[in-house]
Image (cartoon, helix red, strand yellow):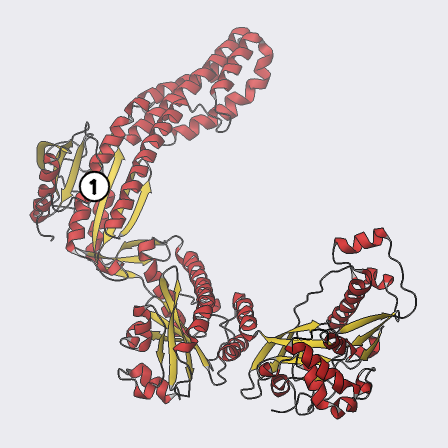
C-alpha cells in the first residue's frame, strides 16, 4: 500500500489566489494531534496508553514535529512516525474506501491523503480533479464564516453551525463518468491563538450572536483581520453522494417541459443515468403510448420541434406483439435481458435491437394512475452490463420519467384539442378519439410539428350506425305563443286608448280622437287574428305616435298623468312592451323544457355506462335528442346487438318518464301546457358525416336523407283520413316504416305494459303522407302517469325480463 505522504502537492485547484485574500495567518502544525496522544499517556494499563508512550519516545527523536511546519520535507523525513500519529484520524483499514486528507488550515493544500482520495480525486500532478458547485465568492464567504465560527466558539464560547452543502464533482478515473462528493471540513485539530489582546464582547453582542447565525459583515466587525492565528490542520473528508445528487438533478431536469424532447436535454438525461448506473455505454430509450401508436424517443433521434409527436418515431402497438416491451407492459414490471443474442423468444423488435448493437437491455413500463402510458429502456452493447442488481436505482427514476412522459402527452393532447375545438367546437366524448386520429393522421401526412397544424382535417364518417330519435314537444306551443302576443298587444293598446280618452276629455282636440280611432282599428283587427308583421307595426305605431306625446299630455291634468303612469307600469322597461302573458308562457315553457332536459341528461348518463354512443340534444319549445350507436363510433369497435336492443327499450322507458315529469309540473305552470312524446323508429343503419362548415354531424348519402326529412316533419303528422294529430298528451307515438320494426317494438310495449309503465290500449295507425316521407305508420300507446318511472333502474334488468325480437 502506498504511503499517504507519497503524493504531497499543492491542492489549491484554480483557487490559489484565495490564500492571499484570507485575513488570518495559518500555520501547519501537528501539535494539536500530538497533544491528543499526550493526553492518553496517563492511561497506564491501556493499550492506547502504551501506544501513546511509545509515540512520545519516538517524538523525542523528532523535536521539529512539535514546531510549525513550513517545509513539507520534514514530514517526509519522519514518514513512519507521522503515519502512526495520523492512524487515530485516518485508520489504515479504511484507506481504500475513505476519501480523506489533512489540509493546512483554511487552505486547499494537503500534506496527507488516503490512497482512495489520491487515486480517484487527484490527478498525476497531485491536484484535485473536478469542480465545486459554488463560485469563488461563495467559497470565500464559506471559508470566512468557518474561521469566524471557530474563533467565537474557541475564544468566546459562542457556537453557531456553518453548514453549506459543498459538492465536489470529479470524473471517475476508470469510466470517466462524473462522481459527486459532499465535502466536510473538521477543525478539531486546529488551535486558535489570539494575536494581541482579546476583545471583550458585550452581553448585548453575545445575545445577538447567540440568537441566530449573524451576517458576515457583523462578525467581521467584531474580529479584525490579523487578530488571530490558526495553527494545526483541517481534516478534509469527501462523502460519495453520487446517487443522491443525480436523482435530485434528474428531478430538476424532468420538471422542464422540454426535458425529453430536446437533443441537448435528452443527452444530459442519458449522461446522468450513465453516472447513476456507473455504465458509460448505457443508452436511454423512451416511448409513449398515444392511441394505437407508440411514439419512440431514442438516443440519437433528431429532436427539433420540442414535441413528443413530431420528434418521435411512430409505430403501431401491434408491431410490438410478443416483444419484451409488450411483456413488460402486460406484467407491469421491469424485464432484464442480460444477453439478447441468447434470448429465446426474440421477435423482430429484439432482432432490430441486436442489429443496432444492443446486447443487454432492461425495459420498464411507465405508469400514471395505474395506467400504462409508455416505457423506458436502458441498453448496453455489453452483455450483463445491466442486471437485476440495478433494480432499486431503476425503481427510483421510473416515477420521474413517467411524470415527464405524461406531461409531454398532456401538452400534445392540449394542442390537438385546441385545434379540434377551432375546427369543430365541442365534440361528444365518445367520438373524440376519431377527431384526434384525424389530426394525428394529418400531421403524419404533412410531416410537421403540431405547432404547424394541418389546414384541413380528413373526412370524419361513421358508417353503419343505428339512429335513435325522440322528441318531447309542447303541444300547440306556437298557438299559445300567438295568443300570448295577442293578449299583450291588446292590453297595451287598451292602456294607450285610456290615455287618449282621458286627454280628449280634458282638451277635446280632434287629433286625439283620430289617434283613438287608429287604436280602435288595431284592436278590432287583433281580436280577429294576429297576422305576420302585426306585432312590429303596432309597437312602432305606439312608440312613434302615442308614447312620444306622453310628456306633453301629462300637462293636461292629474287624470291624464295617472293613465300615463298606469301605461308605463304595465310596460316592461327592458323590452318597452307589455310582456305579461308572454312572460307567463315563456316561464311555463322553460319550466317544462328544463325539467325534461335534466331528466334526459340523468337517464343518458346511465345509458352511456351501459353502452357508449353518440348523443346530441336540442332544446326549444320542447326537447329532442338523437343517438347514433354502433361499432364504428367506438374506438375499440366493441359493439353487440344486445346493447342496441337495450337502448331501444331505454328510449321507450325514458319517454314514459318524460310524460310523468311533465304531468307533475302542471300545478306549477302559469299557462296550462301539455307535452307529447314521439319516437322515430329506424332499424336500417346509416352513415353520418361531420360537416366542418356547420360544425355538426349529418346523415351521409342521398338514401339516408329521407331519415332527416322525416325527423324534421314527423311532429306535424296526422292520422290518415282524419285531421287528428298523431302526437297526443299522455301517449307515446312510435313512427315506423316496416312491419319488422313494429314487431320488435310491440315486444317492448308488451313488457312495459306488464311492468305498469304503459296502459293496455295500443293503436296501430296509418299516417297521411308528408312531403318526402310516404308509407309511414305508427303505434300509439297510453302512459301510466301515476307510476314512478325510472329508466336507469330497469337497464340492469333488461334483457333478462323480456323476450325481444332479433335486431333488424
> Residue 421: image x %, image y %?
42, 56
Nearest the eye: 482 or 808: 808
Image quadrant assignment for residue 357: bottom left
Q: Is residue 761 above or below residue 797?
A: above
User: Between residues 479 and 631, which one lies in front from this camera angle?
Assistant: 631
Viewer can see residue 268: yes
Mark 1 surroundings within 10 Å by alpha-carbon count, few (fewer than 14), some (14 through 19), many (20 or more): many
**Quarter-wise, where is residue 286 in the image?**
bottom left
Res. 617 image quadrant: top left
Q: Position of residue 360 (x, y in %)?
A: 38, 84
* Relative horizontal placement of residue 566, taking residue 672 as reference (left or right): right
Name the residue tied to disc 1.
714
- Closer-to-camera residue (228/280): 228
User: Does residue 176 lie above or below 203 as drawn?
Assistant: below
Query: What secondary structure is found at the residue carrying circle 1?
Result: helix
| Residue 279 falls left or right of residue 793 | right
Is 368 on the left or on the right of 53, as rendered?
left
| Location of the N terminus (image quadrant) | bottom right
Which residue is found at the position 39% from the left and 28% from the top?
Answer: 534
Residue at horizontal 36 percent and vertical 58 percent from the top: 692
Q: Residue 482's spot in the image, x, y percent?
A: 33, 28
Q: Position of residue 564 (x, y in %)?
A: 52, 15
| Residue that appears at 68% across and 84% down | 84
Amino acid at each position: 500500500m502506498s504511503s499517504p505522504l507519497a503524493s504531497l502537492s499543492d491542492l489549491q485547484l484554480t483557487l490559489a489566489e484565495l490564500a492571499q485574500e484570507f485575513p488570518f495567518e495559518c500555520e501547519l502544525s501537528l501539535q494539536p494531534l500530538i497533544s491528543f496522544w499526550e493526553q492518553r499517556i496517563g492511561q497506564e494499563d491501556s493499550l492506547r496508553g502504551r501506544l501513546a508512550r511509545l509515540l512520545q519516545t519516538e517524538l523525542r527523536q523528532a523535536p521539529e514535529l512539535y514546531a510549525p511546519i513550513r517545509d513539507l520535507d520534514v514530514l517526509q523525513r519522519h514518514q513512519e512516525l507521522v503515519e502512526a500519529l495520523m492512524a487515530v484520524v485516518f485508520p489504515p483499514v479504511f484507506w481504500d474506501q475513505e476519501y480523506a486528507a489533512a489540509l493546512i488550515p483554511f487552505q486547499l493544500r494537503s500534506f496527507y491523503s488516503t490512497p482512495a482520495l489520491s487515486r480517484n480525486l487527484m490527478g498525476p500532478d497531485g491536484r484535485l480533479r473536478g469542480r465545486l458547485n459554488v463560485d469563488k465568492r461563495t467559497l470565500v464567504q464559506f471559508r470566512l464564516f468557518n474561521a469566524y465560527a471557530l474563533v467565537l466558539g474557541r475564544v468566546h464560547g459562542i457556537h453557531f453551525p456553518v453548514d453549506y452543502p459543498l459538492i465536489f464533482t470529479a470524473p471517475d478515473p476508470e469510466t470517466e463518468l462524473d462522481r459527486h462528493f459532499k465535502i466536510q471540513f473538521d477543525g478539531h485539530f486546529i488551535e486558535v491563538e489570539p494575536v494581541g489582546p482579546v476583545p471583550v464582547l458585550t452581553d448585548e453582542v453575545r445575545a445577538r450572536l447567540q440568537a441566530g447565525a449573524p451576517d458576515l459583515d457583523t462578525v467581521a466587525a467584531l474580529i479584525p483581520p490579523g487578530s488571530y492565528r490558526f495553527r494545526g490542520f483541517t481534516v478534509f473528508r469527501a462523502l460519495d453522494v453520487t446517487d443522491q445528487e443525480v436523482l435530485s438533478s434528474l428531478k430538476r431536469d424532468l420538471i422542464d417541459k422540454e426535458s425529453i424532447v430536446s437533443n441537448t436535454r435528452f443527452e444530459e438525461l442519458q449522461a446522468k443515468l450513465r453516472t447513476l448506473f456507473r455504465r458509460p455505454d448505457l443508452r436511454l430509450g423512451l416511448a409513449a403510448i398515444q392511441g394505437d401508436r407508440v411514439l419512440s424517443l431514442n438516443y440519437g433521434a433528431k429532436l427539433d420541434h420540442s414535441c413528443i409527436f413530431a420528434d418521435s418515431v411512430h409505430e403501431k402497438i401491434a408491431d410490438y406483439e410478443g416483444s419484451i416491451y409488450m411483456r413488460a407492459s402486460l406484467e407491469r414490471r421491469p424485464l432484464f435481458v442480460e444477453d439478447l443474442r441468447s434470448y429465446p423468444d426474440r421477435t423482430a423488435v429484439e432482432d432490430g435491437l441486436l442489429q443496432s448493437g444492443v446486447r443487454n437491455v432492461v425495459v420498464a413500463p411507465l405508469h400514471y394512475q395505474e395506467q400504462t402510458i409508455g416505457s423506458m429502456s436502458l441498453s448496453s452493447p455489453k452483455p450483463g452490463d445491466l442486471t437485476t442488481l440495478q433494480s432499486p436505482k431503476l425503481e427510483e427514476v421510473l416515477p420521474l420519467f413517467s411524470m415527464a412522459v405524461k406531461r409531454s402527452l398532456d401538452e400534445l393532447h392540449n394542442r390537438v384539442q385546441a385545434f379540434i375545438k377551432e375546427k369543430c367546437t365541442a365534440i361528444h366524448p365518445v367520438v373524440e378519439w376519431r377527431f384526434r386520429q384525424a389530426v394525428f393522421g394529418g400531421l403524419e401526412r404533412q410531416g410537421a410539428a403540431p405547432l404547424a397544424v394541418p389546414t384541413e382535417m380528413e373526412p370524419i364518417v361513421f358508417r353503419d350506425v343505428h339512429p335513435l330519435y325522440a322528441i318531447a314537444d309542447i303541444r300547440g306551443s306556437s298557438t299559445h305563443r300567438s295568443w300570448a302576443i295577442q293578449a299583450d298587444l291588446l292590453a297595451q293598446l287598451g292602456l294607450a286608448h285610456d290615455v287618449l280618452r282621458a286627454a280628449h276629455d280634458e282638451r277635446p282636440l280632434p287629433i286625439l280622437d283620430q289617434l283613438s280611432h287608429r287604436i280602435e282599428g288595431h284592436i278590432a283587427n287583433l281580436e280577429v287574428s294576429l297576422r305576420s308583421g302585426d306585432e312590429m307595426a303596432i309597437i312602432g305605431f305606439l312608440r312613434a305616435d302615442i308614447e312620444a306625446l306622453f310628456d306633453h299630455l301629462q300637462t293636461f291634468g292629474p287624470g291624464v298623468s295617472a293613465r300615463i303612469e298606469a301605461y308605463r307600469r304595465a310596460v316592461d322597461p327592458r323590452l318597452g312592451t307589455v310582456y305579461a302573458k308572454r312572460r307567463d308562457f315563456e316561464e311555463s315553457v322553460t319550466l317544462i323544457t328544463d325539467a325534461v332536459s335534466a331528466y334526459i341528461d340523468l337517464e343518458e348518463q346511465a345509458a352511456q355506462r351501459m353502452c357508449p354512443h353518440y348523443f346530441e340534444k336540442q332544446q326549444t319549445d320542447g326537447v329532442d335528442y338523437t343517438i347514433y350507436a354502433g361499432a364504428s363510433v367506438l374506438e375499440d369497435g366493441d359493439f353487440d346487438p344486445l346493447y342496441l336492443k337495450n337502448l331501444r327499450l331505454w328510449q321507450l322507458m325514458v319517454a314514459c318518464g318524460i310524460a310523468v315529469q311533465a304531468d307533475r309540473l302542471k300545478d306549477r305552470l302559469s299557462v296550462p301546457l301539455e307535452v307529447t312524446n314521439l319516437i322515430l323508429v329506424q332499424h336500417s343503419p346509416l352513415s353520418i358525416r361531420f360537416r366542418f362548415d356547420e360544425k355538426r354531424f349529418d346523415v351521409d348519402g342521398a338514401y339516408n336523407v329521407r331519415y332527416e326529412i322525416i325527423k324534421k316533419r314527423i311532429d306535424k303528422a296526422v292520422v290518415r283520413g282524419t285531421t287528428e294529430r298523431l302526437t297526443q298528451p299522455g301517449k307515446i307515438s312510435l313512427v315506423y316504416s316496416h312491419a319488422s320494426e313494429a314487431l320488435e317494438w310491440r315486444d317492448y310495449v308488451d313488457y312495459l305494459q306488464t311492468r305498469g309503465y304503459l296502459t293496455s290500449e295500443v293503436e296501430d295507425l296509418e299516417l297521411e303522407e308528408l312531403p318526402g316521407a310516404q308509407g309511414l305508420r305508427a303505434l300509439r300507446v297510453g302512459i301510466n302517469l301515476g307510476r314512478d318511472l325510472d329508466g336507469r333502474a330497469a337497464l340492469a334488468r333488461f334483457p333478462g325480463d323480456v323476450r325481444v325480437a332479433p335486431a333488424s
